[in-house]
Image (cartoon, helix red, strand yellow):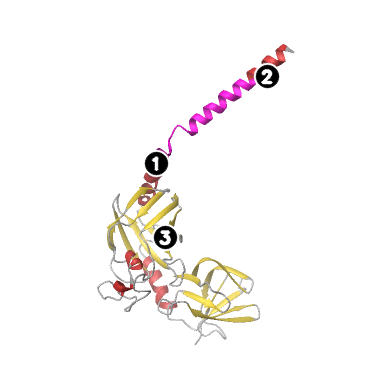
Amino acid sequence: MKIKLFILAISILSLSVSCEKKMDKIFDENPTDRLNASVADVYSTLQSNKDGWVVKYFPSSALEFGGYTLFAKFNNLADVTFEGDLTTLAPQTSTYIVVPGAGPILTFDTYNRIFHYFALPGYFNRNAAYQLPGFLTAQIGAVNEGMKGENDFLVTKASGDSIVMEGRKSYNKVVFLPIKSNEASTIIASYRAAVAKFHAFSNYRFEAGTESFPATFATAATKRALLIAGNAKPYAYRYTPTGLDFYTEYDVNGVKFRELKYVEPTGAYSKGYFTNDAETIKLVPGT
């Protein structure tokens, strides 16, 4: 009996020592060190893809202005260069910084004519000096808000396959996807061509099953978000070379979708249509 008790005591002591060692490893780094390490990791990841990143950007929390595709290249620890699908403006370089906060905070801290257009109040974006070639030539959004974009983002994921952030005001998700080397020379032109092609469409309707649902633009000037009767929130999307990429999964008449691909004109669809892979829903531009 004494031997059994002795063995049990040794086992408990060994377990206690093992747990203490694990706890020591967990708490070897203090929170400040861990946060600083995550900041360094974000800096490294941003610069890791020399061909840059495709940025899915929806500036307003209400999504009424829809989404835009930006192209960002982090040249070094300080400089970032932006281009966009919404404008033919030449690449614009400004600065950025990553600082510790609730997590790593990415801040675009000096003015970039492309990126910060979304954060300009309407008072400024109605001024030709701030407008973007190929985009709008009039005020968009309220005088004091504009398109409700922002400068500061909480980085929630940073890896080679994607970077995910949240706007610190809007809480909108912003996703960075790496540009592949074999598409780097053509990707921007392909997105701009998609905008030129699809932006011309209007008078949309959703077809789901045997029912049809007329859709109007949440903001007629941008034509990147749709409203249908009975839904207060817009169906916000970006233009892509294959069709429309929506901010989140949406539902029309019980049919869920996140991406709709364009089908060229055929039969009764004189302007073509957008559909999901299962072809259970169509978004049809009118004449």
Report the residue marked by disc 1: 37
Asked if the residue at tag 3 contacts the one at tag 2, i.e. Cβ–Cβ closer than 8 Å, the answer is no
Task: Please name the residue shown 53% across and 30% down the image.
Answer: 22
Tag shown at residue 169: 3
Image-based side of 99 in relation to 170, left or right: left
| Residue 240 appears in view | no
Name the mark on residue 8.
2
Report the residue that reaches farthest toward the top.
2
* Three-letter amino acid code of the residue under disc 1: Ala
Q: Tell me the crowding category of disc 1: few under 14, some 14 to 19, or many 20 or more residues within 10 angstroms, Cα based.
A: some
- Front disc: 3 or 1: 3
Residues in magenta, as a range:
11-35
Question: Could you tell me which quadrant the N terminus lies in?
Answer: top right
Earlier in the chain: of badge 1 and badge 2, it is 2
In the image, taking residue 202 as reference, residue 276 lies left or right, namely: right
In front: label 2 or label 3: 3
Q: Looking at the image, which residue is at 38% across and 42% down?
A: 36
Mark pair 1, 2: CA separation? 42 Å
Predominant secondary structure, magenta span: helix
Looking at the picture, how far across and down is residue 123, in whole percent? 30, 73
